[in-house]
Image (cartoon, coloured by chain):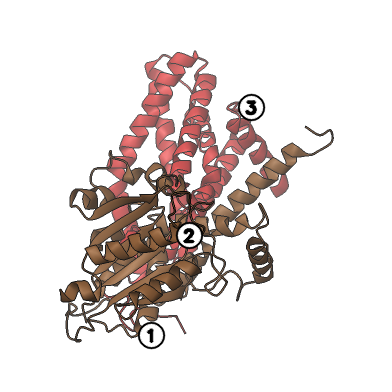
Amino acid sequence: MLSDLFQLVLAEVGAALTLQPHVSGVGAGDQVLVGAVLAVLVAVSMLAGESALLAINRVRGLAYWLTLAMTATGVLLLYLTQASLLWVLGIAIGQPTDWLVLAYATLLAASPKLLSFIQIVPGFGPFLGRLLSAWGFLVLWAATASVFAVGEGLALLVAATAGLTGLAASHFGGPPLVRVRDRIWTAITGRPMRRSSAELLQLPGLLDDGVVGERR
Amino acid sequence: MIAGFPLAEIVVGAVALLLLLLMTAPFEALWWWSQQEEPVQRRAPREVGPAPTQGTTWIVYLAGVGTASSESSRPEQPLLDRLRNRLGDEAVLVTGVFPYSVLDHGLTTDRDLSWLWRVLDRMQRRKWPVLPLLINLYNVFQVLVSADRRYGPFFSLAMARTIWGRLRAAGYQSGSGDPVVLLGWSGGGQICLGASWYLADQGAPVYVLSLGGVLSSDPGLDRVRHLWHLHGSRDRVHRLGALLFPSRWPTSRDSSWNRAKREGRITTTEIGPYTHSSSPSYLTRRPQPDGSVPIEVTTEALLGTLAGAGLLVRDRAR
């Protein structure tokens, strides 16, 4: 039942947000479902938080759904990469663990990102986004301690290594993926994707008669 | 604490309402952009100077965050009257822009909740406490929208279009090269900075005169010929800009603000012992113990700044 699934997602997210993630209390099948639902919800929330970017690119209708799919895939890729890093680190510290459990733990660490819509707030939005990332790291730390059954100090070291490596991976691996995304966007819409609304500032003559006008 | 008084619920409700208002603050600007056609880039570079100069300075006034509409009576009206009288035909003073709406709609007209804003506006004029501050709050949030790198470019484009339209309607000739001075009080100062970018693109030399303005390091500063920031020594509100916007901190060396400062394009002047809005403020008409009248001091400071920069006709003629 759909309502049962959402109740399960709510319970799991609630536990994660209070830094008590249930990393091993859910069956494998449910873990996959909860993880997938979480990734989609996080993507929806992230897109709401990035309304300015959606607006500047006039993302609506089919383009919105495509962007949503790409964002959810990106979220899954990022957190599953982090899970793989944790899996390797687990072997390194002598605590080999099932990859699926780690994947579920890292996806639970994305729970605070469900509040990403709050980044729409003018002025402080990006700062609030950073707070959510910090909160996510705390969840990852708690989940790491629980999954590997290690002390908080070692769990912090492992989570920080996974988190920083994930950051580095998205920093260096992000641009090629963004280029692919932009190419897909241009192929579909026929116009280049703007990275930020600051690109408007580079367009000369926006106050000239008829350059920007209301749509009929 | 009064027994049974739901203080916690009220605080939570107020915070939730505040958050909701903040989250919906950019909606108008986003909706405005969604209604615009995709801009077509200008093909040839703009030529400056095809129209003859009119030998006049054009001053556009943008009101502070306490204003509910461009038509409602404003506390700064006496200041504007004094400026208009003193300027005579040396400069054109353009008023009537509502700086906190990309649609140039005051809060009291053409909105679903206009009736509420009208009630609050009346309460404000009768000096009721607390509730009328919702007007200030709404406008402050629009100042945040203007200062936000994500929404600012839309918001400022819309404001620049409104200002440009008013200037043209008042007789400003595009390409004349006549100086445009954007005069903003309080939050209006930030809106001035944002609009400067696009106005300068029209070939107009743009200057900004901020009266107790709460200013961010807006990219518009890169195109402002000079920013004069006048403030009172007891005005704590104008300091919020330097505090809240990290790009104004000395650590952001390459920000528009710090660059303009290094280039000597920002002048900050303290004009007296005035607060932002409570008496004695920039607009107080009652004489002070030392015999000075704040509103007269403010008028003199504004005119003196313009004259000192050679922006008044008689100064240019000398």
Q: Is residue B116 above or below residue B1?
A: below
Identify the chain drawn in red.
A
The label shown at residue B169 is 1
Q: CA distance from mark 3 to mark 1?
A: 70 Å
* Amino acid of disc 3: Gly
Q: Chain of mark 3?
A: A
In the shown orientation, is residue A89 left or right of residue B199?
Answer: right
- Chain B takes which shade in the image? brown
Q: Position of residue B135 (x, y in %)?
A: 59, 60
Q: Secondary structure at mark 2?
A: loop
The label shown at residue B283 is 2
Q: CA distance from mark 2 to mark 1?
A: 29 Å
In the foreground, A126 or A97: A126
The picture quadrant where one finds residue B190 is: bottom left
Identity of the residue furthest to the right in this view: B4
Residue pictured at 48% horizontal, 37% vertical: A131
In the foreground, B127 or A172: B127
Q: Is residue A167 above or below residue A150?
A: below
Dot 1, how many residues are within 10 Å of its Cα: few (below 14), some (14-19), or many (20+)?
A: few
Does residue A61 appear anywhere in the picture? Answer: no
Q: Are marks 2 and 1 in contact (CB under 8 Å)?
A: no
Q: Secondary structure at mark 3?
A: loop
Q: CA distance from mark 3 to mark 2?
A: 66 Å
Q: Chain of mark 1?
A: B
Residue that carries the numbered disc 3 in the rendered image: A25
Q: Are marks 3 and 1 in contact (CB under 8 Å)?
A: no
Same-subunit check for callouts 3 and 1: no
Q: Secondary structure at mark 1?
A: helix
The picture quadrant where one finds residue B316 is: bottom left
Dot 3, how many residues are within 10 Å of its Cα: few (below 14), some (14-19), or many (20+)?
A: few
In the foreground, A65 or B14: B14
